Image (spheres, grey):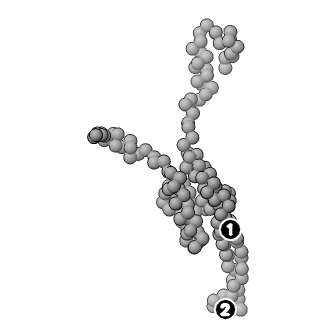
Amino acid sequence: MKIYINESQLETINNSEKEITYYEFNIWVRNFLKLLLSNPAEAEPNASLKQLGLNKKDLIKKLKKRGMLTSDENITEVPNEDDETKKRAKYVIKYSVPRKNFERNMHRLHTEICESEWKPKSVLSDEAEEIRKILDMDDDNAYKDRGGYKL
């Protein structure tokens, strides 16, 4: 069986947004968490997560909100490398990933990020305008007999 596709159909297929599966999303987030645990300063989400509009700060915020990531922040004083008598402040942040309800929270995060953009749009551009059009079609004011009212 052969399927023939013309150029306009090919453009439509290429331009259509690919739905992100849970498995793909799970791999992307787990890789980001692995990078965050090993080296928080250099951890960055991959290009696919960035394409969803998630930068490092936003993704960490969403993970903390879902309870998938906790952080321990400290400011300590360490001796200066040049002069041992002087101290400088050092900001230390440690992340940990709780195991409790991790998979359930991952599913919810996927739903929040990936499927929230797929909400069905309203068929009516302006609902009040459409209601007026429907009521105006009724010339003999039968809508009043049915208990309706005109806007």
Which of the two residues, 29 or 144, is positioned nearer the viewer here?
A: 29
- Cα separation, mark 1 vs mark 2, equals 32 Å
- State the mark number for residue 71: 1
Query: What x and y, as percent, mark residue 41?
Result: 58, 72
Determine the image quadrant of residue 2. top left
| Residue that appears at 67% across and 64% down | 98
Between circles 1 and 2, the one closer to the viewer is: 1
Image-based side of 102 in relation to 12, left or right? right
The C terminus: image quadrant: top right
Query: What x and y, as percent, mark residue 108?
Result: 62, 51
Say which amino acid is labelled 2.
Answer: Asp
Q: Secondary structure at mark 1?
A: strand
Query: What x and y, as percent, mark residue 97?
Result: 64, 66
Q: Is residue 69 visible?
A: no
| Residue that appears at 61% across and 20% down | 132
Q: Secondary structure at mark 2?
A: loop
Q: Earlier in the sequence, mark 1 or mark 2?
A: 1
Determine the image quadrant of residue 140. top right
Location of mark 2 (residue) = 83
| Residue that appears at 55% across and 49% down | 114
Q: Assess disc 2: are there few (<14), some (14-19) or many (≥20) residues with their C-alpha within 10 Å of its C-alpha.
A: few
Q: Is residue 36 visible?
A: yes
